[in-house]
Amino acid sequence: MNGKTWIARPGTVSLLALAALLLVVLPAVLDIFRLNLVGKYLAYAFVAVGLVMLWGWGGVLSLGQGVFFGLGGYAMAMFLKLEASDLESTKIQSTPGIPDFMDWNQLTELPFWWEPFKSLPFALVAVLLLPTALAFVIGFAMFKRRVGGVYFAIITQAVALILTVLIIGQQGYTGGVNGITDLKTLLGWDIRTDSAKLTLYYVCALTLLATIAFGMWVQRSKFGTLLLAIRDKEDRVRFSGYDVAAFKVAVFCAAAALAGVGGAMFTLQVGFMSPSFVGIVPSIEMVIFAAVGGRSSLVGAVVGTLLVNTGKTLLSETFPDLWLFLMAALFIGVTMALPDGLAGLVENKFKPWWQRCQADRRSLKKHLAAADISGE
Amino acid sequence: MGLSEMFNIALMQGFAGISLFSVLLLMALGLAIIFGQMGVINMAHGEFMAIGAYTVFLASTLTEKFLPSLIQVYFPFAIVAAFCFSFVAGWVAEWSLIRHLYKRPLDTLLATWGLSLALQQTFRSAISPKEVSPTLPDWLMGSWAPTEGLDIPINGMFVLALTTLVTAGVMIALYRSRWGLRVRATVSNRSMASAIGINTKKTDRLTFAIGCGIAGIAGAAFTTIGSTGPTSGSLYIVDAFLVVTFGGAASLLGTVASAFVISQTQSISEFFMTGSMAKVLTLCLIVVILMIRPQGLFATKVRR
């Protein structure tokens, strides 16, 4: 096996560097507003990490990760919304005790499937289980029948469209285009204060780092090796007696669960959830985050997410027109010139160059030393 | 199928369903060539349609300004121009981007998504960030009322006629012409096609450009139905992909059939529920059927 297929092998060094950046450097240099933005990007990074496992290692491209992100985010938002709509704060409504958008849409009671979201444990389980269950259904149906590649991408894209149309169409139950807004407290803890934002940032960053560490462990395990093998020569793995479909379903579910966690983190830090994070465009953008960072490197995906989002935020503020062109150039450039993303650039270009430099220096030293001896 | 029979079907299903059918089919035809035949995931397909639509808009603006007497006849020429512009754009896109990515089909998706972003911003900066509509000739307006209580919009009939024409043209070109023979040979076995002397690179470029040109015709036709904005291309793209995939990627007949099935499901279910729920139902149905029958309705039997 050549070096390229193994790019960005599990690197404890890069993980530690990322941890130092997220936990020490960024909180030290950024104010709480910017740090909150970074926290939002880190929520996306969960999706990117899931995509690395699914796409970079498993070779399956999903264009519907926004669906799972949205399911996790909405599950969290529903809990927070119910907490924010207690009888006291909704007493001016015609039906107190239900979320405001339901009242606006002439609903007189809470829909039965909203009821269980009054409990935090249920909501937390839903954050993980809703995306996983949907991913299992889709993945099982598709991978068992050996549907992959392009077809899988298009079907996941259709699922993203379905969910968006559904959320927007069922305004009374979902908040429609505006989404679920005005989220205030988590079990009485005001999530809009600066200290809460700081805490949530650390929770998000630590969870992400733990996820990456776990992902690196997976990559070293037999499961990770088999995923790479499936990506590179699926038939051969199948003929060796492995159930390829089961592996793909498993990794698809894992990626979906991660996206769900990311969605929940996003809702907590941003304070609302809307269909604009669910549809086709955000789903493809999430793929781009992973692609820019390096589709087979976990740390790379996080770096890619941070870079693209920072660029988007900074540039779209100052040059709203230029930003889309830059984004386009980034997609095209990365796809054409850097198929392994930034991580591939580091691994394939920078590291060999650095090693060559080191070797040159050593041999130069040796020469000089030899010259010194012979000169005397 | 006789004319009276057609008329009966139109009465039964409602002309709206037929009209939606022709829209979907016209949208999907170019993609059936690019994605179905060549296997390139062209996410910029909607933007090539927008190029066609903007061509008509420009043509109508120019005609109004310089040759107002020709406003009744400019439209067919504008459609031809739309084909040409999209054709050239497709040619350039193939030359600069796509040809490097034939071995990595999923990467064509990313690159063409970037292309579509760039085109959208170009429309926004160069033409207008708002929706525009061309001035249409009078003969395209209004509706045709053969009997009392039956109104058939003329623009819908125009799109239907154009779709029939273009579909027939593509069918003939693909299955009766030398180009079609080369395309089908290149698609089924590239190295063999190249070995027997087909210039596969040239074939690819021409095929991609023709697919884009047809997208341009579709976009031009849709100016008779609705306005065009920088992002209107992206509204069509998923539908177009689903039509092609649902029909069975490499089968043109499948594309026609799937456009028909999808449009009828959509328009019939619209009787019973809101438009958005009808859309959800239709999409769910497509996804479920695709899960059961992943190769689409009309899968070509090929050994791979």
Image (cartoon, rainbow, N blue to C red):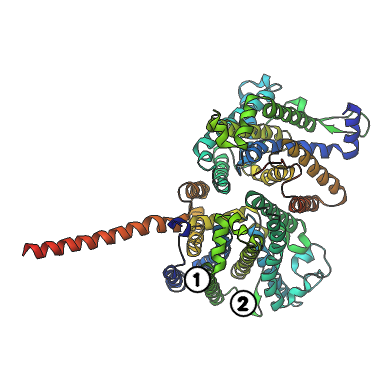
State which tag comes first along the sequence, 2 or 1. Answer: 1
Which residue is the extreme one toward the front? A240
Q: Chain of mark 2?
A: A
Crowd around label 2: few <14 · some 14–19 · many ≥20 (10 Å) = some
Taking the spot 77% from the left edge, 59% from the top edge, the residue there is A170
Crowd around label 1: few <14 · some 14–19 · many ≥20 (10 Å) = some
- Percent across and percent down for residue A180 are 69, 65
Residue with the mark numbered 2: A190
Report the front residue among A227 and A320: A227
Mark 2 vs mark 1, CA separation in Å: 16 Å
User: Does residue A227 appear in the picture of this structure?
Assistant: yes
The vertical placement of A236 against A86, above or below, is above
Taking the spot 68% from the left edge, 57% from the top edge, the residue there is A143
Name which quarter of the figure residue B122 lies in: top right
Kindly identify the amino acid type of the residue bearing the numbered disc 1: Ile
Query: If the image is split into quadrants, where does the C terminus of chain A sit?
Result: bottom left
Position of B52 with respect to B261 (left or right) is: left
Q: Indicate the secondary structure of the residue bearing disc 1.
A: helix
Q: Which mark is residue A70?
A: none
Residue with the mark numbered 1: A32
Q: Chain of mark 1?
A: A
- Percent across and percent down for residue A260 are 64, 67
Taking the spot 62% from the left edge, 51% from the top edge, the residue there is A149
Report the front residue among A16 and A225: A225
Asked if the residues shown at circle 2 and circle 1 are in contact, with their CB atoms under 8 angstroms apart, the answer is no
- Percent across and percent down for residue A328 are 52, 47
- Percent across and percent down for residue A286 are 57, 57
Name which quarter of the figure residue A76 lies in: bottom right
Kindly identify the amino acid type of the residue bearing the numbered disc 2: Asp
